Each structure stands twice: as structure tokens, then as C-alpha cells.
Image (cartoon, rainbow, N blue to C red):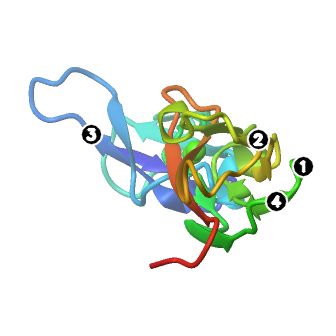
Amino acid sequence: MLQVVPGSGRGWERFQLEGRQEGGGPGGDLRALTALDYENPEHRRGFSFRVQVSDVTGNSWQDRHHVDSAWVNLTLVDANDNPPTLAAHHVYRTLPEDTPTGTRLATFTAYDLDGAGETNMTYLVSAASDPGGKFRVDETGTVWLVGGLDRETNAAHTVLMWAVDDGVPPRTATATLSVSNGVFE
Ligand SMILES: [Ca+2]
Ligand SMILES: [Ca+2]
């Protein structure tokens, strides 16, 4: 018989040791009873507990001649299972066409639960949505006007922006900035 030793260490109650099915060979299988989540600070600390095996059935865990034990130390590895979360998804700005370059237009700062909240985010403006190169996003997710607006050539701009996390593979969140040189219709 097999058991996770009750009270033996951090997280012991989350695991169960099961004997193999017939023909499965000697030993047992350690099974998690609940989902494990790196984003849970308690789980992130890892688990450390003892397991025991006995070659006789019955209440004989104290019998040194029939019981052996081992420590199990488990460390979770972070997976990129969360997409970035943006502070805003769609911002509308109405600007006079003489708005100077260098004007701050919007901030789309993203947060990510992965990496214990220490994700390095990359922000990008879709070149296809900004053919004139009038908008730039910096490393904080703030979008700046870097080109002059001209109502006669283009009265409105719909700029697509991405926040990309540093996971493998990366995950992305999308935001839109709508800029009008007049009034939104
Ligand atoms: Ca992520
Ligand atoms: Ca994660």
C-alpha cells in the first residue's frame, strides 16, 4: 500500500498516491487532486512532502521493517496561459488638424498574469492601419502623434495596436484608436 504522508510538508493534501493497475508494474502514480496554477503564489512556492510504501496491508506505517519512504519535491514551471489584459480596448479622440506632433493620444498599458506579473510587453502599431506612419506607440503602451494630420486627405484614422507578451508562443491583445479630425459620424 501507498500513501502521501499526512501533514508531512507543503501541499501534501493536494496529492494522492495510487497503486498501479494490474500489470502496471511496481510502484505507484502520484496524482494531483486539484489543478495546479503557477499564477497562484502558494503553488508557485512549490510542494514538498513525503510518500510511503508498505509491503503489508493494514495499519503498519510505523513498522520500519515493512515501510520505506521518500521525499517528493515539486516545482511548477510557468506556462504562457494568460493573454495580456489591456487597460482600454477602444479609445476615440477628436483632434483639430493642427494638433502638434508629439501629442499623447491614448494609453493602452497591458497587464499579464504570467511570469508572476513581470512580463515584458511589446507594443506595436499595425503598419497596415497606419499607412502614413502618423502614430507611434512607446514601451509603456502610450500612443503618440508623430505625423501631421490633414483633414483634406484623411478625415479619420482607425489605428490598430497590439500588446504582445514575452511567452513562448507569445499571446496578443488588440486595441483600437479612432482619431477624427472632425466629429465622429
Ligand atoms: Ca501571458
Ligand atoms: Ca502562467
Tag 1: amino acid: Gly
Mark 4 sits near ligand 1, with its Cβ under 8 Å away = no
Question: Could you tell me which secondary element the residue under label 3 belongs to?
Answer: strand
Is residue 48 shown left or right of residue 157? right
**Which mark, residue 19?**
3
Q: CA distance from mark 2 to mark 3?
A: 69 Å
Q: CA distance from mark 4 to mark 3?
A: 76 Å
Tag 2: amino acid: Gly
Discs 4, 3 touching: Cβ within 8 Å: no
**Which mark, residue 98?**
4
Q: CA distance from mark 1 to mark 3?
A: 67 Å
Mark sitting earlier along the chain (1/3)? 3
Q: Where on the picture, by quarter, is residue 104? A: bottom right
**Which mark, residue 102?**
1
Mark sitting earlier along the chain (4/3)? 3
What's the residue at 54%, 37% (across, down)? Answer: 126
Tag 3: amino acid: Gly
Q: Where on the picture, by quarter, is residue 86? A: bottom right
Q: Where is mark 2, residue-wise?
A: 147
- Along the line of sight, which residue is nearer the eye, 179 or 28? 179
